[in-house]
């Protein structure tokens, strides 16, 4: 994040910062443990937070494809899950989501044209892959 102006000292260990309008949903008082001195070199300053930053500090990407499916569940409830390859700003990540949730929010992933509707197979073609934070998820 870029440097923000300290507008008030609150007690011995907290400061109020002047935050831009797009961060108005966030509390403007910070403990000294999360503050850092300004870095003078422009190259080291992290740009503004993403515009689609949620209140819980998560960022939504868009689902690219369904990689695989599995049946599972817990506490006696059965739930089918799908492994989703997400993309945001050119970065890909793989997560497991409930099929019901994904069908509700992203029905376009489950069209018959996609080749994955109830197929239980990997949606990637052989040789394709999806980057994950753990490495590459390779099509089988």
Image (cartoon, grey):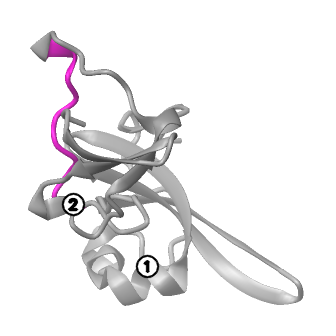
At x 43%, y 66%, the residue is: 56
Most extreme residue toward the right, as rendered?
76
| Residues packed near mark 2 inside 10 Å, few (<14), some (14 to 19) or many (20 plus) | some
Q: Is residue 51 magenta?
A: yes
Q: Quadrant of the N terminus?
A: top left
Q: Main secondary structure of the magenta part?
A: loop
The location of residue 26, given as percent across then percent down, is 32, 64
- Asked whether 40 falls inside the magenta stretch, the response is no
User: 137 and 20: which one is in front?
Assistant: 20
User: Which of the marked residues, 1 or 2, is nearer the chain's N terminus?
Assistant: 2
Task: Give the residue at x 36% y 79%.
Answer: 110
Q: Which mark is residue 102?
A: 1
Indicate the secondary structure of the residue bearing disc 2: helix
Residue ID at (35%, 43%) = 92
In the displayed structure image, the side of residue 133 where residue 64 appears, left or right: left
Residue receiving disc 2:
23
């Amino acid at each position: 994040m870029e440097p923000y102006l300290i507008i008030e000292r609150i007690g011995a260990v907290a400061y109020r910062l002047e935050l831009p309008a797009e961060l108005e949903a966030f509390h403007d008082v910070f403990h000294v443990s999360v503050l850092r001195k300004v870095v003078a070199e422009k190259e080291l300053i992290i740009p503004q937070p993403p515009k689609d930053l949620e209140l819980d500090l998560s960022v939504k990407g868009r689902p690219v494809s369904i990689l695989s499916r599995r049946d599972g569940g817990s506490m006696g409830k059965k739930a089918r899950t799908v492994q989703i390859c997400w993309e945001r700003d050119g970065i890909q990540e793989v997560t497991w989501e409930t099929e019901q949730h994904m069908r509700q929010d992203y029905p376009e992933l489950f069209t018959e044209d996609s080749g994955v509707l109830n197929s239980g197979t990997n949606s990637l073609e052989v040789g394709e892959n999806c980057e994950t934070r753990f490495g590459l998820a390779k099509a089988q």
